[in-house]
Every structure is written in C-alpha cells, then in structure tokens.
Image: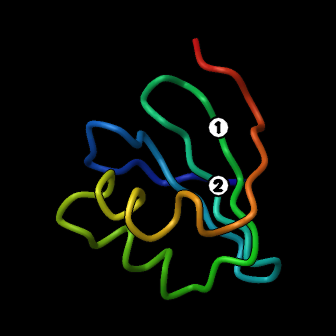
Amino acid sequence: MRRTPLDSAAIAAAGYDADTAVLELQFTSGEVYRYYAVPPSVYRALRSAESAGRYFTEHIRDVYPTEHVREGR
C-alpha cells in the first residue's frame, strides 16, 4: 500500500485503501500496523489533525481491529 508521509513525531506515514477500508500506519520506530474497517473520514481526520499521534491514540488505537505487519528497525 502506498503511504504518504505525515508531519508527526510518532507516525512517519499513513496509507488508506478505500475499497477495503484498511488504514496502514508506519510509525517512526519503523513498525507497520494495519487497521481494519476504518471509515474514510477517520483517515482524512488523521491526515489533517494538528497532532496525528494524539488523534491516533484517541480515535484509532484500541478502536479498530489491528494487524502488526512489520517490526521496527
């Protein structure tokens, strides 16, 4: 999945597949996670949030089913 860089201390990049409602996040640690059944509005809000890390913590983490895709560096 193609990811777009984010201006965030915690999240390096985010990608979204609207057909499958999958959000993929690459954290600054290098770890990659996929979040399932994520509405497009959540992805848009993450990209425009003043703090992507805070938005992630409050609205994504522990809300959507998750798959750990890749270990960090």
- Foreground of the two, 58 or 70: 58
Q: At numbered mark 1, what does the secondary structure look like: helix, strand or loop?
A: strand
Q: At numbered mark 2, what does the secondary structure look like: helix, strand or loop?
A: strand
- The location of residue 17, given as percent across then percent down, is 71, 72
Callout 1: 10 Å neighbours few (<14), some, many (20+)?
many
Tell whether 68 sits left or right of 4. Answer: right
Tell whether 39 sits left or right of 53. Answer: right
Q: What amino acid type should be assigned to the residue bearing mark 1?
A: Val
Q: Is residue 13 above or below residue 57?
A: above
Q: How is the image coloured?
A: rainbow
Tell whether 45 sits left or right of 27. Answer: left
Give the residue drawn at x 47%, y 46%. Answer: 13
Give the residue drawn at x 33%, y 51%. Answer: 53
Callout 2: 10 Å neighbours few (<14), some, many (20+)?
many
- Foreground of the two, 20 or 68: 68
Quadrant occupied by the N terminus: bottom right
Quadrant occupied by the C terminus: top right
Q: Is residue 20 above or below residue 56?
A: below
Q: Earlier in the sequence, mark 1 or mark 2?
A: 2
Q: What amino acid type should be assigned to the residue bearing mark 2?
A: Glu
- The location of residue 22, given as percent across then percent down, is 73, 68
Q: CA distance from mark 1 to mark 2?
A: 7 Å
Which residue occupies the extreme left position in the image?
50
Give the residue drawn at x 60%, y 69%. Answer: 63
Report which quarter residue 16 is drawn in.
Answer: bottom right
Which residue occupies the extreme top position in the image?
73
Tell whether 53 sits left or right of 60. Answer: left
Residue indicated by mark 1: 32
Dot 1 and dot 2 residues touching (CB under 8 Å): yes
Residue indicated by mark 2: 24
- The location of residue 37, given as percent across then percent down, is 74, 77
Give the residue drawn at x 43%, y 79%. Answer: 44
